[in-house]
Image: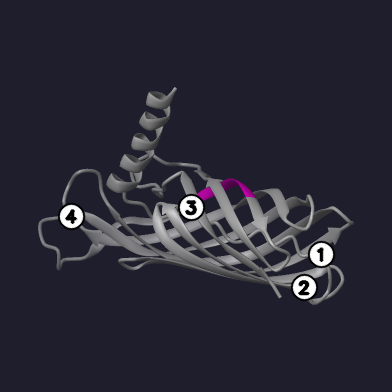
Amino acid sequence: MKRRCSAIVIILLSLTATSCWTYKPQLADIPLIDHKGDVRLAGSIYWLPPGVNATVSMGLTNHLALQFHGDYEGRDVFYSHAALGFYNSDSTSVLEGYLGLGHGHGDVYIDAHPASAYGPYTIGFAQFNYGWHLNRHWDIGLAMKVGRVSAILRGHDGEDPNDDKEVFGPRKSALLEPQFFVRVGGEKVKFQLQMGYTYLSGWPRTGAIRYIPISLSTGLNFTL
């Protein structure tokens, strides 16, 4: 059993260490807003793949919420989004739905050749969250994001790094992204573990949007 778990960890680490991608699961905080004036701040470190992110979410009214999210991995790889949401809650559970628009920048090597491609992408998405306040110290929940990723990548063929040309052109992929999180701690500050999986239609066809399917992050969640 220990050997099997070790093998899985090694495979995942090898995947993130050797793969280059335009998109990965974006683990914005799943805030579970439950009242007007509720403000949640979250900051996390990505372990798969390495990076950092931050999210601010707030209850605007008794049913409307607003969220801002940012993600940075270095090497011109970043992402941000803004989303308007609707929420409904009772004493133990929260249902949220968000409509958002995201913008990012990716950097990818093409296969094992010295060629590269880079450029911006946009995401239009809807995300649905459902979670439970088990007690004052535990939160748990699930999310599902659906949408479309559009990218225009440029790069070079490896012969002359200064000779940029369009290698992928406009590409569009449907997005499906389930997520899971658990939070534990005090009423105002909790430790958070979050995982996500991405499926983009079209990859690995030649020229399609490349992505890494798994993200894992840990961080802190603050309730103001």
Q: Earlier in the sequence, mark 2 or mark 4?
A: 2
Q: Nearer the viewer, residue 203 or 45?
A: 45
Q: Looking at the magenta stretch, what is its main secondary structure?
A: strand
- For numbered disc 1, what is the local secondary structure? loop
Which residue position is annotated with label 4? 157
Q: How far apart are the two marked residues, 2 and 1, measured between alpha carbons?
A: 7 Å
- For numbered disc 4, what is the local secondary structure? loop
Of discs 2 and 3, which sits in the foreground? 2
Q: How far apart are the two marked residues, 1 and 4, measured between alpha carbons?
A: 51 Å
Instruction: Name the kind of residue labelled 3 in the image.
Output: Lys
The verdict on residue 33 being magenta is no
Q: Nearer the viewer, residue 193 or 144?
A: 193
Question: Where's residue 171, x and y in %?
Answer: 43, 53
Q: Earlier in the sequence, mark 2 or mark 3?
A: 2
Instruction: Name the kind of residue labelled 1 in the image.
Output: Asp
Instruction: Name the kind of residue labelled 2 in the image.
Output: Asp
Tell me: residue 224, above or below residue 150: below
Instruction: Name the kind of residue labelled 4 in the image.
Output: Asp
Q: Earlier in the sequence, mark 1 or mark 3?
A: 1
Q: Earlier in the sequence, mark 4 or mark 3?
A: 4
In the rendered structure, are the residues bearing label 2 and label 4 in contact, judged by CB atoms less than 8 Å apart? no
Q: How far apart are the two marked residues, 2 and 4, measured between alpha carbons?
A: 50 Å
Q: Which mark is residue 34?
A: 1
